[in-house]
Image (cartoon, rainbow, N blue to C red):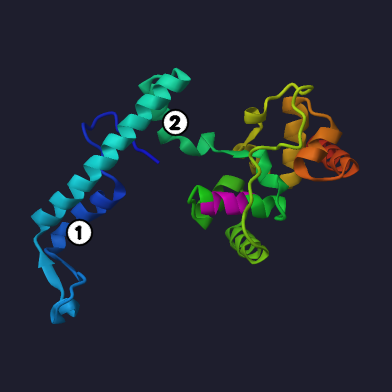
Amino acid sequence: MFVVASNMPLCFSRVVFDTLLNFRKGYYKFKLSKKSKEKDNPISVSREDYLLSLVDTESSSINESLSIIDEIKSKYNVGMNQIIDLVKNKDKYISVPVGLFRSELGPLEAVVRYLKDVLDYNFAQIARLLSRDGTTIWTTYNNSVKKGKLVVDLELKDIEFRGLKVKRDELIVPLSVFSERGLSILESLGLYLKETFGLNYHVIGRLLNRNERTVWTVVNRAKRKLENE
């Protein structure tokens, strides 16, 4: 993750920002490991020295971030204003790969697990993004952990793409698709794949490791729900 600030020559991460706020309290004390008998004694570090060490570390991160930004500008032919908008409104641009839904986890479990473990969102943020109750998100995540690891199939090697209108790397789904509270994750997903990419029920079933008839039922149920709203 990187941060772009339009009015600042340098961008301090949250770590440095919090550190600066806490300097009002005076000196930080840290326990540094030593081989001597004094290993358990706290060592006082002046706030100036500590800040300098953080800035030095942060400078490396800033240089790396600027390199990533240049790469994005070149690869996708976008300007700095577009990148700034992307960073400032990143929640609007979150997408998940279709291969996420081929795991043993349920659709909601897979999305929650992906947002928490891969994108590092907390439960409150995930609940807001998915328009779900916070307790539901917490329970869903813990249930998914009990089932095992999160597996995301990005290669989709068993799918024949030559006859499809969509390329392999285009099979991503905006997270906003799942914010329709009246539909389940699977209903939203099936409907999106059908209407956006023009995929038939057989292909959607292959993509999601589900029976073609199940996909037909799910998609048509989603349509009826939306029509009755």
Figure check: 1 above or below 148: above
For label 1, the crowd category at 10 Å Cα-Cα, with few meaning under 14, some 14 to 19 and many 20 or more, is few
**Residue lying furthest bottom:** 37
Q: Is residue 182 visible?
A: no
**Residue 57 position in % (x across, y down):** 22, 47
Identify the secondary structure beneath mark 1: helix
The answer to whether 69 appears left or right of 160 in the picture is: left
Give yes or no for residue 98 being in the magenta stretch: no
CA gap, disc 2 to disc 1?
30 Å
**Residue 181 position in % (x across, y down):** 68, 46
In the image, the segment drawn in magenta is: 111-117
* Residue 210 tag number: none
Q: Which residue is mark 1?
A: 22
For label 2, the crowd category at 10 Å Cα-Cα, with few meaning under 14, some 14 to 19 and many 20 or more, is some
Residue at x 76% of width, y 39% of height: 207
State the residue in front, 44 or 191: 44
Figure check: 109 above or below 228: below
Quarter of the image where one finds residue 220? top right
The answer to whether 110 appears left or right of 90 in the picture is: right
Q: Callout 2, which amino acid?
A: Leu
Label 2 or label 1, whichever comes before in sequence order: 1
Quarter of the image where one finds residue 50? bottom left
Q: Which residue is mark 2?
A: 86
Figure check: 7 above or below 36: above
The answer to whether 34 appears left or right of 174 in the picture is: left
Q: Callout 1, which amino acid?
A: Asn
Q: Is residue 33 visible?
A: yes
Residue at x 80% of width, y 39% of height: 206
